[in-house]
Image (tube, rainbow, N blue to C red):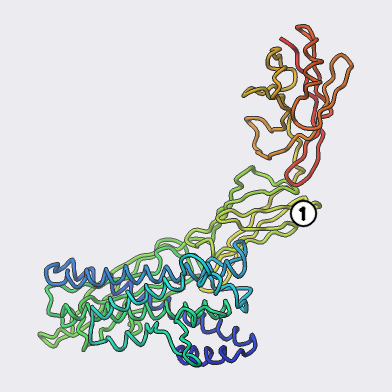
Amino acid sequence: MIGMMYLVLTAMLALNVSTDILKAFKLVDDSLHSTLSSTDSHNRALMNDFRALRDENPQKNGEWYDKAAELTAQSDSLFDYIQHMKYQIAVATDGQKKADPEARVIEGNDNRDAATRYALPNRGEKPGTVLKEKIIAYRDLLISLDPAKAQEFNTTFDVSDRPESGDKIITWEDQMFHDMPSGAAVVLMTKLQNDIRNAQNDMIQYLRASTDAGDLRVNKLSAYVIPNANYVIRGSKYTAQIVLAAVDSTQRPEYYVEGQRINNNGIYEVTASSLGLKKYTGWISYQNPATGEMATLPFQSEYSVGEPAVTISNTDLNIMYRKYENKFAISVPGVSNDKIRVNVASASVQQRGSIWVIVPNESAKTVTISVLAELDGKMQPMGTKDYRVKVLPAPGAYFKSGEAEYASDSKISRNAILNKNATVIASYGQDGLLDVPFKVTSFKVDVNGVVLESRSNKITQEQISRIEKLKMGSMVVIKDIRAESPNGERKVLTPILLTLN
């Protein structure tokens, strides 16, 4: 069904139909990702089963397992390269800051220039051509493993050029990326990823069947429980795949958990309604081919159920400052960062990598951070925390000469104060909780009532010349010190009183 939708939509796109077609492409992309998730889980289960067979009989199964492992590595490599290309197209379309890391949502999905510009640049290496070469290499690997499926693989991974009008030939990479809307290009590559995982799945099963492991003529049978996760949050679902290794392909095992028979696929699913460690047992029932009688293999497993929780830590301080970029590390146990959402009333919120930047509004007195996480496809609240909002305090003023910093009421040598490279700086001090880069824009030096101004943070030659005339024990007053914060807020700092030592 997905393949038919893909063919129809591609044909409609060639006719330059309205942007509604791009919305339909998004539906296809979502369906493909659902299939990818299922196929990935199946491939992992197959490889785990295959690994167990290899461990039981390395001499018989080792060679076939090594081929499957190499196929998996090559599949992952090509899959990841395509994923990288999808993200780069998203970046070329929406910009670095707005680009979806998973390339699932592209705001400018009708952009017909981004895919061409990235995949088929006028100069240098063309990622589209590199992708074509990688697909050919991968297709050749599949055919080398199972030559009987050469025609199938050549069709699935057909990257041949095709004739257009007259004698003109259009390359495969031009078909994929030239003048192709970003949303459509990404969906076409998702289909490629889906083809890779399906081919990988078929070949793993083929290689495993080559070991004759499916006829039960082995010296050991084992039951395996493969959970999606061993830690779940209350309200979410615990899911596990229960499999029988080396099962006879002509038989259909029966699966039981806590005495109750479950579905024929061995999928055990239960809603986590209470907290703590949950243990369960069961068995797999199958027909012994030697005796014809029913036999059983027991299994047991466990998982933990935790309370919905969120960890919020302010990386700068334990309160928030108004009109200041307060940085927070926010995480939910067992949930990746891309599945987390942060809402803060009376403040702006921006995610920068693993850090959330929160800037309270000018009128805010308190703010509440609310954290949600996507669990089982739904956004669920994980927790909240309140913070007081204060005005960013003014920093202290210091006279800096060389590496030394002199606070007010300090004694200073003549050489230090007459240093032509000396500056006046604004800082919260070595023990301060904040590290805001205030910039001193001007200050005045008062020497025995004579006031001289510097319109930067550096001491002027005129000020130095006046200070040179002072005797030991004289006082120099640096006052009217003006500083500016990164957001443009201006403050007048307290004077610095220095005594010549």
Camera-nearest residue between 67 and 290: 67
Camera-nearest residue between 439 and 134: 134
Classify the position of the C terminus by image quarter: top right
Q: Position of residue 350 (x, y in %)?
A: 65, 58
Q: Residue at x 63, y 43 (%)?
A: 316
Instruction: Give the secondary structure at mark 1.
Output: loop
- Give above or below for 117 relative to 154: above
- Give above or below for 55 relative to 362: below
Q: Where is residue 13 in the image (x, y as percent from the top left)?
A: 57, 88
Taking the view exactly as shown, the residue that stands out farthest to the top is: 472
Q: Where is residue 482 in the image (x, y as percent from the top left)?
A: 81, 34
Taking the view exactly as shown, the residue that stands out farthest to the front is: 167
Report which quarter residue 116 is drawn in: bottom right
Classify the position of the N terminus by image quarter: bottom left
Say whether residue 34 is visible.
no
Q: Which residue is drawn at 18% across and 74% down?
A: 221
Say whether residue 320 is visible.
yes
Q: Which amino acid does label 1 sit on?
A: Asn
Q: Where is residue 107 in the image (x, y as percent from the top left)?
A: 63, 73
Query: Mark 1 — residue?
Result: 361
* Horizontal side, residue 452 vs residue 119: left or right: right
Q: Residue at x 72, y 38 (%)?
A: 438
- Give above or below for 128 relative to 169: above
- Give above or below for 336 relative to 283: above
Report which quarter residue 90 is drawn in: bottom right
Q: How many marks?
A: 1
Camera-nearest residue between 487 and 169: 169
* Horizontal side, residue 171 vs residue 328: left or right: left
